[in-house]
Image (cartoon, rainbow, N blue to C red):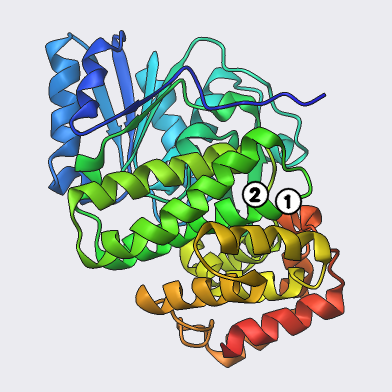
C-alpha cells in the first residue's frame, strides 16, 4: 500500500493568479522572501496591497540567501513570534519557501528545534497557521512538497528535513512573477527541475502516477527550458513553471537519488547554487546509474519520449542542454579552487553518500563516490 500526496489544498495557475490572495482570509500575514527581487519588481507591494484591501496587517521578513541556514530560520522565527500571524506567505525562490516551512512549524510547536528536526521526529501537521507559497523561480517544486532543505553551517552540509506539515495549503503559480528571472537563474533552477523529474523516474519507488508525472515533466522541460532561457517569452516561462511543479509532485512520491546527495554536500561546503550543482552532476550520475539495466531501461524510455534512441543519447541530450544553458562542465569551471576541493575531501565524500544517495537506484561505495567527485571537479 502506498499513500500518494499531490500538493496541498489547491494549486492556482495562470497569469495574474496572484490575485487569488484576495480570497484568502487572514488578519495578520507574515511574508517571507529572498533578496530584493520581489521588492524591486513590485510583487511585494502588490501582495501587501491585496492584504491591506482586506484589512489584513503584514510583516515582511526578507534577505533569505540562496542556501538558507539555521540562523536565518531562527532570526525569522523570532520576528514571527513577535508578530503573531495567522497566515504565513512565502514568495520568491525555493530558499525563502524552504525557510518559511521550518519557521511555520517551529512557530506552532515552540518545543521544536533543529536538534529534534535532524532526528526526523517532526509533527505531521500544522495546527491552524495557513501557509501559502508563491514561487518566483521555476525549479524546486517546493510549493507542493514535504521537504525543506536547510544548510547546517557547522556541519558544512545541507539537510533535507521532511514532514507533511511542510506542504503549503495553497500554491500559486503565476508566470508573470517569473518574467524577471535572469538567464542564469532560469538555467540553474530549470536544471534542478529536470534533475527532480529524471531522478524520480529512475527511482525504484516509482509508481504509475509518478511515472506519468515524471516522464511528462522530463519531456516538457527538455522542450521548453531552452526557449525560456533564450527567448524569455511568457508562454515558455509558464510552461517551465508548470513542469517544475509537476516534477515536484513526482519526486514527492518517489524520492530522488545521487545527484541530490552530491548537491546537498557540495552546496553545503562551497555555497554554490543547488540547481547549478545538480546540472553539473546529472550527466555523471546518469552514466554511473546506467550500468544497472533497471535504470538503463528507464533511460531508454525517456530517450524515446524525446525522440532519441537509447540511454546514451538521453545522457547526451542532458549534456547538450547544459551547453545551451551555459552551465559549466565541472566544479572547477564553476569557481571551486583545487585546494578547497582537496581539503576535507574524505569528509565531502562521506557527506555525498548521505541523504538522497541512500535511495539511489544503484548502490555507491565510498571509493566510487570519490571517483565520481573527481570527474565532477575536472568536468
Corner quadrant of residue 298: bottom right
Q: Does residue 256 lie above or below 17 as drawn?
A: below
Q: Position of residue 46 (x, y in %)?
A: 14, 30
Q: Which of 62 and 210 is in front in this view?
A: 210
- Judge the density around disc 1: few (<14), some (14-19), many (≥20) Cα neighbours within 10 Å: many
Q: Which residue is at a point 39% across and 54% down the rendered structure image? A: 65
Q: Is residue 192 left or right of residue 86?
A: right
Q: Residue 367 carries which label?
A: none
Q: Where is residue 197 in the image (x, y as percent from the top left)?
A: 56, 51
Q: Is residue 90 among what the camera can see?
A: yes
Q: Where is residue 352 in the image (x, y as percent from the top left)?
A: 72, 66
- For the C terminus, the image quarter is bottom right
Q: Is residue 193 among what the camera can see?
A: no
Secondary structure under tag 1 reads loop
- The answer to whether the residue labelled 1 contacts the one labelled 2, judged by CB atoms less than 8 Å apart, is yes
**Residue at mark 1:** 203
Q: Which mark is residue 200?
A: 2
Q: Does residue 169 lie above or below 55 as drawn?
A: below
Amino acid at each position: 500500500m502506498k499513500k500518494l500526496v499531490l500538493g496541498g489544498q489547491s494549486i492556482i495557475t495562470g497569469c495574474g493568479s496572484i490575485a487569488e490572495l484576495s480570497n484568502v482570509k487572514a488578519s495578520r500575514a507574515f511574508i517571507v522572501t529572498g533578496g530584493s527581487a520581489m521588492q524591486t519588481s513590485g510583487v511585494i507591494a502588490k501582495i501587501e496591497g491585496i492584504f491591506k484591501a482586506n484589512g489584513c496587517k503584514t510583516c515582511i521578513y526578507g534577505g533569505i540567501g540562496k542556501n538558507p541556514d539555521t540562523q536565518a530560520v531562527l532570526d525569522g522565527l523570532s520576528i514571527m513570534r513577535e508578530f503573531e500571524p495567522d497566515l504565513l506567505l512565502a514568495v520568491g525562490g525555493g530558499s525563502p519557501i524552504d525557510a518559511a516551512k521550518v519557521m511555520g512549524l517551529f512557530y506552532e510547536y515552540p518545543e521544536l528545534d533543529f536538534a529534534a528536526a535532524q532526528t526526523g521526529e517532526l509533527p505531521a501537521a500544522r495546527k491552524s497557521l495557513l501557509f501559502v507559497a508563491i514561487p518566483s523561480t521555476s525549479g524546486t517544486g517546493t510549493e507542493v512538497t514535504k521537504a525543506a532543505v536547510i544548510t547546517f553551517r557547522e556541519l558544512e552540509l545541507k539537510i533535507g528535513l521532511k514532514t507533511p506539515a511542510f506542504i503549503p495549503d495553497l500554491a500559486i503559480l503565476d508566470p508573470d512573477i517569473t518574467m524577471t528571472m535572469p538567464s542564469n537563474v532560469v538555467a540553474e533552477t530549470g536544471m534542478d527541475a529536470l534533475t527532480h523529474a529524471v531522478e524520480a523516474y529512475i527511482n525504484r519507488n516509482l509508481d504509475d502516477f509518478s511515472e506519468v508525472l515524471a516522464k511528462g515533466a522530463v519531456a516538457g522541460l527538455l522542450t521548453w527550458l531552452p526557449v525560456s532561457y533564450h527567448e524569455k517569452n511568457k508562454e515558455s516561462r509558464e510552461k517551465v513553471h508548470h513542469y517544475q511543479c509537476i516534477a515536484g509532485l513526482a519526486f514527492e512520491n518517489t524520492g530522488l537519488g545521487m545527484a541530490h546527495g552530491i548537491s546537498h554536500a557540495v552546496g553545503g561546503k562551497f555555497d554554490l547554487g543547488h540547481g547549478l550543482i545538480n546540472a553539473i552532476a546529472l550527466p555523471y550520475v546518469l552514466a554511473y546509474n546506467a550500468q544497472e539495466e533497471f535504470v538503463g531501461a528507464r533511460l531508454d524510455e525517456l530517450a524515446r519520449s524525446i525522440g532519441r534512441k537509447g540511454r546514451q543519447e538521453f545522457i547526451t541530450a542532458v549534456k547538450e542542454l547544459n551547453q545551451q544553458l551555459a552551465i559549466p562542465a565541472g566544479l572547477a569551471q564553476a569557481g571551486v579552487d583545487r585546494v578547497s576541493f582537496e581539503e576535507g575531501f574524505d569528509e565531502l565524500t562521506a557527506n555525498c553518500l548521505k541523504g538522497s544517495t541512500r535511495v539511489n537506484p544503484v548502490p555507491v561505495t565510498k571509493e566510487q563516490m570519490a571517483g565520481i567527485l573527481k570527474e565532477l571537479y575536472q568536468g
